[in-house]
Amino acid sequence: MKTPILGQAYVARSVNAADNRMVNLFPEATPENGKDVGFLNRAPGLRLLATVGSGPVRGMWQYGGYGYVVSSNTLYRVDAAWNATVLGTVSGSGPVSMSDNGTQLFVACNPLSYIYNATTGVFAQITDPDFAGAVTVGYIDGYFVFNQPNSQTIWVTQLLDGTSVDPLEFASAEGSPDNLVGLIVDHREVWLFGTNSVEVWYDSGNVNFPLERIQGAFNEIGCAAPYSIAKLDNGLFWLGSDARGNGIVYRANGYTGQRVSTHAIEFAIQNYANISDAFAYTYQQEGHAFYVLTFPTGNATWVYDVATGAWHERAAFYNGQFSRHASNCQMSFSNEIVVGDCASGNLYAFDLDVYADNGGAQRWLRSWRAIPSGQNNLKRTAQHSLQLDCETGVGLNTGQGSDPQAMLRWSDDGGHTWSNEHWASMGAIGASGTRTFWRRLGMTDKLRDRVYEVSGSDPVKVALIGAELSVSSTNG
């Protein structure tokens, strides 16, 4: 019978109910006469492009034919050949928010902020006495707009001049008494995220202050983390918070929030000691639009794929353990999807044809219930064999991966304890007729329920189309 290896990550509060983990794999649907309804792809590896400063890489932005990178306390300009030029020193150690007006780049470091002028080459801190600091920044109709730390206040700079702030060019988001967390400009509208609410403003052209609240564009879903707000798929995504709790991921639906996280994702998120430090970036690759949400305190990275509506984990693999993914931020530049490293100044390309993370192991993993949902009658079963339906013959010419291995283990108590690993070949190079097969898998005891887990770390292509399980019931 077909055993349900496809799907998404869903590890429930009780692993006895659901223990479907998926790390460094993502599903893709195959609607046009595919062998099955879909398959699991290996997540992109990290291909080194350049090392810019000492790191970590705190933010990136591109405009005017250059990429701009904040690495540690330095802003760099990067050209298409990945040559980096120092532009100046910035403050802080956390994520930065960046925006441009075509000439000037605004770097908000919460609270201090900086302007780089690409025409004059001048880089300087914003020292206008009326500048009260910025957490996040956006651009609308010639103005930089930013939110003042620990307040309800938003400001705009002078038209086409981020270095100058008029003392009267501010307003308060007062639809709710909560402080603002962050803002983002989308479709020429400014979304203002408070801790318990969101309101949306537009450029009304008023003389005293150009922005005005859109009547009715208010909802009582706030934001738990300012750097979780990101654009994707013609909309906005963020990690939510309101007066009733936090830890739900939302997507904008009109001016309201539509929940896209699952109970399993929310269970994981709400068990992290701190979620206010979460940050997100987005990117598109081969039609998959990904929202990548990292929790530094929780040491985890969760990814939502708009194309399938499915979640998976992205992870680094150190000392035999999964940890948060190495990437901190993203930009699309020089025909590459570029991400910055969380511990160094490395810039990487996300590459679906690279099966390692900067030369180190990228481990993938999938766990799933052996018996399809609703078909387990709680009788003992003899599990005779399991065969992965996968692309084989993917081995390398030499070295690790010349005989790539898939590693299988199983749990007969719902996912609480596990067997030893059992290895099977995925085929040397060109051996596309290889069957990735395990035999004599024993009887199910205890809960009469089995969870399988398959994983690997060889630097080879991985495409899992399905799995076939030979099983028979016994009396009792």
Image (cartoon, rainbow, N blue to C red):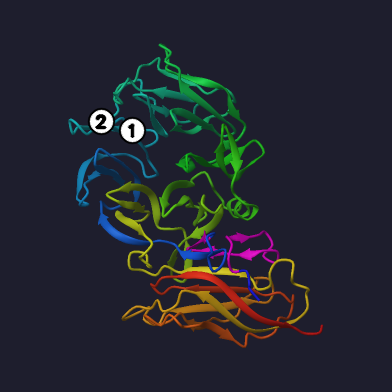
At label 2, counting other C-alpha atoms closer than 10 Å, the crowd grade (few under 14, some 14-19, many 20 or more) is some
Number of callouts: 2
Residue 289 visible (yes or no): yes
Q: Residue at x 29, y 51 (%)?
A: 335
Residue plotted at (57% across, 41% down): 240
- The amino acid type of the residue labelled 1 equals Ser
The residue that label 2 is drawn on is 103
Q: Residue furthest right?
A: 476
Element under label 1? strand
Mark 2 or 1, nearer chain start:
2
Q: Residue 296, how many percent across, how many down?
A: 47, 52
Residue under label 1, please give it: 113
Q: Quadrant of residue 13?
A: bottom right
Which residue extends farthest front?
A: 33
Rendered location of residue 63, percent (x, y)? 28, 39
Residue 231: x, y in percent? 45, 40
Q: Residue furthest left?
A: 120
Three-letter amino acid code of the residue under disc 2: Thr
Q: Which residues are magenta?
A: 5-30
Quadrant location, the C terminus: bottom right
Going by the image, does 40 lie left or right of 247?
left
Q: Quadrant of the N terminus?
A: bottom right
Closest to the observer, 148 or 175: 175
